[in-house]
Image: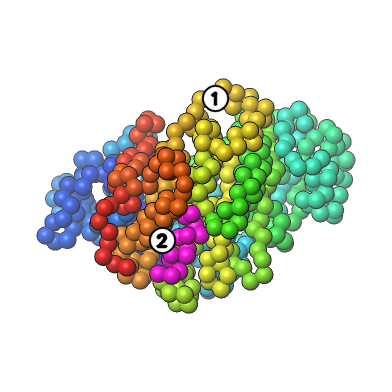
């Protein structure tokens, strides 16, 4: 199913449009003529010329009309429909970076084409959470390499991609304890009996015994079956040969890939833990392994965050918020070649009350097979503005309060947020995925004594400077993390859908957000503290996601953008 500007069955057009939009947004392409007589905008991309029909959306996000991109041939000076390889060749980046980019863009197109051959659910609105989290196939609405999955073949994708929705079992290893660090909530035998169930655990324990190892000498470590095939004859070969690793084969309940690919949902019992496993593939800007230092830190962070939220009654009444804790982590070969390539994180699954419905937030920016927004039935039932007001309250205020009142910022983007509704009416927010996405300011914490002892968890944290890991000395870093993820790369997609489907302008949508934050600020007693997180600056910084793929220099991975919450003149729409 498409995003609002997608043309049916035109995968390359979407990739081209997102690529050019990102180049403009991050300042790699230059707008030469913002408004010519024929309704097109002239662009300079490196030494080449392009044109398209576009206008500037909130935070400077370019909104390009589908199918409008053209490139000028330098020999004939004629305008022609943009071709992907021609466009990439114009990008003013090192040749190696351009070649990598082109390969990932072409891979994205191939996997998009494969999606169209797979069975699709007729109406995703009726799916339970576990099925819906695997069925949101649109992927990242900004990054042009949104489905590159470098390392996967078409056969791999058909087996392990979320679009295929095929269950598979994990491969299990016994790894010598000298090379393993665990953060488990119980002893290993108790832990695995509880997580796997008696029959599956007994089968693994029996296999360990036949291999001459036990839980005293070796730790159990599950592995994605693709990762097992990728490593068994490579980095793992010597470990298997000398006995540091024993292969125990496949076992346990089957799992399905969620939209994040490396996070898996239990197919047999979706209420059981979500399993996060490393994959040596590249998608969007990242290698999808596990950040090594975060693996055993994650349970400590989760307990701290959960305690912080539980101690604030506002998170149960005014700003309802729940967290899915990452309660177990296993790290293998710390600081070695396998660090981050083997390991495990377990995360709680959502718990719902009778009558509640849970929806990954990025579903709210999608269209369905009937051509209407995913959210259309709820808006038809409750009305556009009442529903929007309530959705923004439920989504924005818990994240904002956590930052302003507690000094903690989270990457609240479309995949990391779960909206809980009752009869289509938003009730509360669930947040997930903290191990790489939390940032806090020690000077602004209400109870700094409750912080995990990071240096005791991992020596890498001992004496680490501000902004190297989870902590920062600057409140504006928290504000920019929240506004970057929640506003610039998430809610802008909802505002586009609302304007496209319902005619409410994007600026009117952001006026609602501005009014909401103004109201929060009017009630917040500590005005000096509130001022540290001013939402109405005329400009803010945002991450340059595509530039990370194109350029080596860290200082250009951020750029300044106009802030629609800083406009003094409001839209005349309601």
Residue at disc 2, secondary structure: helix
Q: Is residue 57 positioned above or below 329 on the image?
A: below
In front of the other: 269 or 161:
269
Q: Residue furthest front?
A: 525
**Is the C terminus in the top left, top right, bottom left or bottom right quadrant?**
bottom left
Residue 154 got which mark?
Answer: none
Label 2, label 1: how many angstroms apart (C-alpha)? 38 Å
Instruction: Rate crowding at label 1 as few (under 14), some (14 to 19) or many (20 or more) other CA atoms within 10 Å.
Output: few
Asked if residue 557 lies left or right of residue 62, the reply is: right
The structure residue drawn at horizontal position 81% and vertical position 54%, both measured from the top left corner, is: 197
Disc 2 residue crowd, few under 14, some 14–19, many 20+, Cα 10 Å? many
Q: Is residue 255 left or right of residue 499?
A: right
Where residue 414 appears, x then y in whole percent? 49, 55
Residue 165, above or below 246: below
| Left or right placement of residue 129 versus residue 409 in this view | right
Disc ID at residue 464: 1
In this rendered view, identify the residue nearer to me: 175 or 260: 260
The picture places residue 133, in percent across and down from the top left corner, at 57, 60
Identity of the residue drawn at 59% across and 41% down: 435
| Quarter of image, res 100 | top left
Say whether residue 29 is magenta. Answer: no
Kindly identify the residue that appears in the image at 52 percent across and 53 percent down. 398
Q: Main secondary structure of the magenta part?
A: helix
Residue numbers of the magenta segment: 385-397
Up the image or down, 231 lies above or below 18; here it is above
Q: Quadrant of residue 186?
A: top right
Asked where in the image residue 5 lies, by quadrant, the reply is bottom left
- Residue shown at 37% from the left, 66% from the top: 498
Q: Nearer the viewer, residue 172 or 500?
A: 500
Q: Which mark is residue 494?
A: 2
């Amino acid at each position: 199913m498409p995003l609002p500007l997608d043309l049916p069955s035109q995968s390359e057009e979407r990739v081209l449009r997102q690529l050019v939009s990102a180049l403009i947004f991050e300042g790699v392409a230059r707008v030469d003529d913002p408004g010519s007589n024929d309704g097109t905008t002239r662009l300079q991309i490196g030494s080449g010329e392009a044109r398209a029909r576009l206008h500037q959306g909130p935070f400077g996000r370019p909104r390009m009309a589908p199918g409008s991109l053209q490139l000028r041939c330098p020999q004939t000076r004629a305008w022609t429909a943009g071709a992907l390889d021609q466009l990439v060749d114009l990008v003013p980046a090192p040749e190696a970076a351009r070649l990598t980019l082109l390969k990932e863009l072409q891979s994205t197109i191939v996997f998009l084409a494969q999606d169209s051959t797979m069975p699709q659910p007729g109406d995703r609105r009726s799916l339970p959470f576990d099925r819906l989290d695997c069925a949101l196939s649109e992927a990242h609405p900004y990054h042009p390499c949104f489905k590159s999955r470098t390392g996967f073949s078409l056969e791999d994708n058909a087996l392990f991609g979320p679009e295929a929705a095929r269950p598979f079992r994990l491969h299990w290893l016994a790894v010598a304890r000298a090379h393993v660090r665990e953060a488990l909530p119980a002893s290993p035998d108790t832990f695995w009996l509880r997580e796997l169930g008696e029959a599956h655990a007994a089968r693994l324990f029996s296999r360990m015994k036949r291999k001459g190892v036990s839980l005293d000498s070796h730790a159990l470590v599950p592995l994605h079956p693709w990762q097992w095939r990728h490593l068994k004859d490579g980095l793992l070969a010597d470990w298997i040969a000398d006995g540091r690793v024993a292969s125990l084969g496949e076992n346990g309940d089957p799992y399905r890939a969620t939209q994040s690919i490396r996070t898996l949902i239990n197919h047999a019992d979706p209420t059981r833990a979500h399993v996060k496993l490393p994959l040596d593939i590249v998608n969007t800007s990242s290698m999808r392994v596990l950040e090594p230092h975060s693996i055993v830190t994650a349970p400590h962070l989760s307990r701290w965050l959960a305690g912080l939220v539980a101690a604030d009654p506002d998170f149960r009444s005014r700003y309802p918020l729940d967290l899915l804790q990452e309660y177990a982590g296993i790290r293998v070969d710390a600081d070695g070649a396998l660090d981050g390539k083997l390991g495990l994180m377990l995360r709680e699954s959502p718990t719902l009350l009778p009558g509640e419905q849970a929806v990954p937030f990025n579903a709210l920016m999608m269209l369905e097979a009937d051509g209407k927004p995913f959210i259309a039935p709820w808006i038809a039932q409750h009305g556009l503005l009442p529903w929007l007001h309530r959705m923004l309250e439920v989504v924005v205020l818990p994240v904002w309060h956590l930052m302003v009142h507690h000094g903690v910022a989270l990457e609240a983007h479309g995949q990391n947020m779960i909206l809980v509704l009752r009869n289509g009416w938003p009730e509360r927010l669930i947040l997930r995925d903290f191990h790489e996405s939390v940032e806090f300011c020690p000077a602004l914490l209400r109870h700094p004594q409750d912080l995990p002892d990071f240096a005791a968890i991992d020596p890498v944290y001992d004496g680490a400077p501000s902004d190297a890991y989870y902590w920062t000395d600057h409140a504006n870093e928290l504000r920019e993390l929240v506004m970057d993820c929640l506003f610039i790369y998430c809610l802008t997609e909802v505002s586009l859908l609302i304007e496209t489907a319902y005619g409410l302008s994007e600026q009117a949508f952001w006026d609602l957000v501005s009014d909401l934050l103004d109201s929060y600020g009017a009630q917040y007693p500590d005005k000096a503290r509130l001022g540290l997180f001013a939402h109405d600056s005329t400009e803010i910084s945002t991450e340059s996601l595509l530039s990370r793929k194109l350029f080596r220099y860290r200082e250009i991975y951020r750029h300044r953008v106009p802030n629609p919450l800083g406009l003094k003149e409001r839209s005349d729409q309601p």
